[in-house]
Image (cartoon, rainbow, N blue to C red):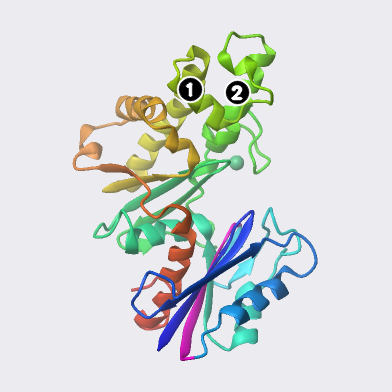
Amino acid sequence: MKYHLAVDVGGTWLRAAVFPLGETTPARRERIRTPRAGRPEAALVALLRELWPTDGEVLGIGVASPGPLDPSRGVILATPNIPAWRDFPLAAYLQDAFGVPVAVDNDANLAALGEWRYGAAQGHHDVLYLTVSTGIGAGVIVNDRLLHGAHGLAGELGHIPILPDGPLCGCGQRGHLEAVASGTAIARAAREALAAEEVSSLASLAAPPTAADVARAAHAGDALARRILAEAAGHLGRALAGFLHIFNPSIVILGGGVVQAGEVFLSPMEAALRAAVMHPAYLDGLTLTTAALGDDAGLLGALALAREFEKDGSVCDE
Ligand SMILES: [Zn+2]
């Protein structure tokens, strides 16, 4: 038997799975809590050793990790949940440990790759993937290639500037899309409205409201909650119009917890998108859909990345 290994370095879980050649259902999978201290790379090696198949050959390992990182060298520049991985050569480290090819890419890029190969975007050539949760991540496929840019840093669509002097973004800048349209932004807007004594059912919660609380209240008809969601959705919809102008995708895939709010978020988002697009041709035949792979998007993207080795030996270069 021949296998690929896929790794997803998440904020909470470090997941890994073994996939038999040609299959998208893992033969085995394991997860451990993401180690925040010590030597997380040693924990990862131990996890992979535990999973390593004894009845065949491993052809390659793909790793999805939060960035910023350099996919061409497999170096993690910094990652918020694992402070020890600063300029850390993860691909070379795993290659030394296991003697097989290793490729590393940004988790949102790989979620896009996973949806393209195995999920909602199969058969498309130009794909825009956005995940809206605590942050906003994105991956873009242009003419059947994952967009990387000169240093592997392209596609950070959550960090386009929207509001001058706006709220602080997860990246340290102000007013980026992530700072006005993510789950974190929605929760902050609700907290600020309650502090300003606006009337809402959210005021009766024991703890400060989360984005999921805001979505629940919006579904129950709470006017403040609906307004907060509509504002965030409006920013996202207008930004999306900009992304359509730049990339002209045939499919937009929305992942992440915030879009689970459903129509109370998606309707105002679509209305803002339609109002901001420069010509209706951008919407012709455009599929706007939610992600198909759920929690496994990163893992399946890492699998797709590992399988790129078979094509011609160079990653994402068909
Ligand atoms: Zn930012």
Residue 286 percent coordinates (x, y) = 24, 42
Image-quarter location of ligand 1 = top right
Viewer-side residue, 185 vs 171: 185
156 sits left or right of 33 in the view: left
What label does residue 231 carry, if any?
Answer: 1
The range drawn in magenta is: 55-67
| Residue plotted at (56% across, 79% down) | 51
Residue 204 is drawn in which quadrant?
top right
Could you tell me which quadrant the C terminus lies in?
bottom left
Residue 229 percent coordinates (x, y) = 48, 24
Viewer-side residue, 5 vs 153: 5
- At mark 2, the secondary structure is helix
61 magenta-colored: yes
97 magenta-colored: no
| Residue plotted at (39% across, 69% down) | 25
What label does residue 189 carry, if any?
Answer: 2
Residue 3 is drawn in which quadrant?
bottom left
Could you tell me which quadrant the N terminus lies in?
bottom left
Tell me: residue 145, above or below residue 214: below
Instruction: Check if mark 2's residue and mark 1's residue have beta carbons within 8 Å.
Output: yes
Between the residue at mark 2 and the residue at mark 1, the CA separation in whole angstroms equals 10 Å
The amino acid sitting under disc 2 is Ala
Q: Main secondary structure of the magenta part?
A: strand
